[in-house]
Image (spheres, rainbow, N blue to C red):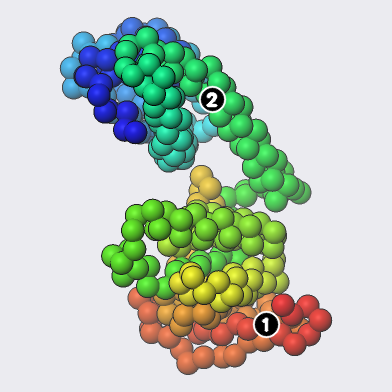
Amino acid sequence: MELSENLDAGVLGVIQSEVEQTLLGGPRRYTRDQIAELADVPLERAQRLWVSMGFAIDADPDAVMFTDGDVAALRALVGFVDGGALAPDAAVAATRALGQSMSRLAEWQVAVLNSHLADELATAHAQSGTLDEQALRTAVGSLTSQLLPTVEALQSYVWRRHLAAATARRSGSVGEDTSHRALVVGFADMVGYTSLTRRIRVDDLSSLLEEFESQTTSIITQGGGWVVKNVGDEVMFAAEKAADAARIALALQYAAHTDTDRPDLRVGLAAGSVLMRFGDLFGEAVNIAARLTSAARPGTVLVDAELAAMLADDDGVTLRSLRPLRVRGYSRLRAFALRPGRGPDGP
């Protein structure tokens, strides 16, 4: 049942207000000038940080937008920067990255919470035959008291585990510049995804993407790599070791080949120095891996010359040199087809 069914705008407004106060820790009390004054932060700086998190500022300077929680958060962020933990010129970029990550997470969580609330309302309606305001308030109270603390705790736990994993990957580099690292970057792309989206139902598309993301994440993490990001029909990943990256790519292709209900994959790998910036990767190796993925035939893995040299003595894989590729940005890009080897380490 949709939340808007049989509910007038006034009741929905009451529910929205209660949910918002619970999430934000209280009602909106302050204008932008007031929050800047309370946090002892110049207005321009406060606005820049607010916008970088992905939130709009009302054109009306007298609009009451901010809560006590916003004041505390602004003080904490500015104190974090002024205390030297984060460079001033990186503060906006850091808050932007955090805001973008949290925005995507929030969109998913709202869908889950909305579904739960819809079930609560459907149950209340079936029992009483009406959807009065008290039933709505009870449903919202149940939602906030049961689900939100659990979701928040789980979110914190997962973040800490990922922080520990990222720290382990960079062990031994304390005091060094870790923004540039030698890595193998890979992309795996579903073939024919655009045309497929025009032929299947939205529910089937959701199931396909869920299966794709679940399977690729499992293969990549179990193989010693990590997922950089998922973008629809494509996953970007990285690994520190050439052998790990090669076996991840081959395992991805094997899984896709054995699942006849899923589109084929194209996979491209490239090795080199990359810039690590707020969880994303940039640099020539990233560009080459993307170009190789686009040029690969369905069901194949292409690697660049640098990675091929690293894998030359690996009995677990075989490499076949291809004609130089003409792709965007490269007129003669050397490429090698990667296949499982016949040695004891081959798949």
Task: Name the residue beneath numbered marker 2.
Answer: 147
- The mark that comes first in sequence, 1 or 2, is 2
The quadrant the C terminus occupies is bottom right
Q: Quadrant of residue 310?
A: bottom right
Of 285 and 209, the residue lying toward us: 209
Q: CA distance from mark 1 to mark 2?
A: 46 Å
Q: In this orientation, does residue 90 appear?
A: no
Identify the amino acid type marked 2: Leu
| Residue 79 placement (x, y as % from top left) | 52, 19
Q: Residues within 10 Å of mark 1 (few under 14, many from 20)?
A: some
Mark 1 belongs to which amino acid? Pro
How packed mark 2 is, by other alpha carbons closer than 10 Å (few <14, some 14-19, many 20 or more), is some
Q: Is residue 53 above or below residue 22?
A: below
User: In front: 323, or 220?
Assistant: 220
Disc 1 is placed on an element classified as strand
User: Count of labels shown?
Assistant: 2
The answer to whether residue 309 of the structure is visible from this angle is yes
Residue that numbered label 1 is attached to: 340
Rendering coords of residue 246 (x, y %): 65, 73
- Percent across and percent down for residue 129 are 33, 19
Looking at the image, which is closer to me, 14 or 23? 14
3 to 218, vertically: above or below: above
Q: Position of residue 164 (x, y in %)?
A: 70, 41
Q: Is residue 44 left or right of residue 226?
A: left
Viewer-closest of 316 and 12: 12
